[in-house]
Image (spheres, helix red, strand yellow):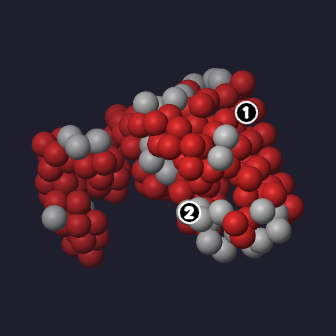
């Protein structure tokens, strides 16, 4: 398959949340980049985002004991880091936000504290996985239902999912319970 066909199929896989297919297609695109990165008119950040989003799979390892899912996630990150080291061009700078996003998710897996959950959820949104962000924030809000930052992150994920009423509700509650110097997060969500 050529790049255009792979790109089109990737878009379809992403739209249908077919994570295994998206992972396979992303790997093929990365292989093309590795062979000749100069001849491809490609958005490397988009490919990296799709790939890193796909290796999360169902995301069950974020919530429960899923050694297979966690092992796959970690092995794919190692493989991606190897690709970055071995590629002919320096991609690390251009995909730095995606690398930071995946590192925050790794941190959450190893240390599921409230602050790492908030960061992981915000970064799951950046990788195009807002539903998982909502699930993590739901868990955090069960522990502390007035955690304004968790409300803002969940509300922002609801925006991504086009659930406007839920987003507004979270934004209003976050605004009501946020510290005076931290109200800008809730106000941004509500805007």
Residue that carries the numbered disc 2 in the rendered image: 43
**Total count of labels:** 2
Position of 39 compared to 136: left or right? Answer: right
Whole-percent x and y of residue 123?
49, 54
Point out the tag, 1 or 2, that comes first from the N-terminus. 2
Position of 79 compared to 113: left or right? Answer: right
Secondary structure under badge 2? loop
Badge 1 vs badge 2, beta-carbon distance below 8 Å: no
Number of residues whose C-alpha sits closer than 10 Å to that of mark 2, classed few (under 14), some (14–19) or many (20 or more): few
Quarter of the image with the C terminus in it: bottom left
Position of 167 compared to 108: left or right? Answer: left
Q: Which of 51 and 183 is in front in this view?
A: 51
Secondary structure under badge 1? helix
Residue shown at 13%/43% (left/top)? 165
Q: Nearer the viewer, residue 47 or 134?
A: 47
Q: Which of 64 and 90 is in front in this view?
A: 90
**Residue 181, quarter of the rendered image:** bottom left
Residue shown at 82%/68% (left/top)? 88
Quarter of the image with the N terminus in it: top right
Number of residues whose C-alpha sits closer than 10 Å to that of mark 1, classed few (under 14), some (14–19) or many (20 or more): some
From mark 1 to mark 2, how far is it between C-alphas? 25 Å
Up the image or down, 13 lies above or below 129; here it is above
Q: Which mark is residue 8?
A: none
Whole-percent x and y of residue 28?
71, 43
Up the image or down, 148 lies above or below 23; here it is below
Whole-percent x and y of residue 114?
47, 49
Whole-percent x and y of residue 43?
56, 63
Residue that carries the numbered disc 1 in the rendered image: 72
Looking at the image, can residue 100 be seen?
A: no
Residue shown at 81%/57% (left/top)? 35
């Amino acid at each position: 398959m050529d790049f255009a066909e792979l790109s089109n199929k990737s878009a379809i896989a992403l739209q249908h949340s077919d994570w295994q297919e998206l992972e396979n297609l992303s790997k093929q695109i990365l292989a093309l980049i590795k062979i000749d990165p100069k001849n491809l008119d490609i958005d490397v950040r988009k490919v990296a985002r799709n790939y890193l989003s796909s290796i999360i799979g169902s995301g069950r390892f974020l919530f429960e004991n899923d050694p297979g899912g966690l092992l796959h996630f970690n092995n794919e990150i190692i493989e991606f880091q190897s690709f970055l080291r071995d590629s002919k061009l320096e991609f690390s700078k251009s995909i730095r936000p995606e690398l930071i996003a995946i590192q925050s998710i790794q941190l959450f897996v190893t240390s599921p504290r409230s602050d790492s959950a908030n960061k992981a959820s915000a970064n799951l949104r950046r990788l195009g996985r807002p539903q998982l962000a909502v699930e993590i924030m739901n868990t955090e809000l069960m522990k502390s239902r007035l955690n304004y930052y968790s409300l803002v992150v969940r509300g922002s994920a609801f925006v991504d999912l086009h659930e406007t009423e839920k987003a507004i509700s979270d934004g209003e509650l976050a605004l009501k319970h946020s510290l005076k110097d931290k109200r800008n997060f809730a106000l941004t969500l509500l805007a």
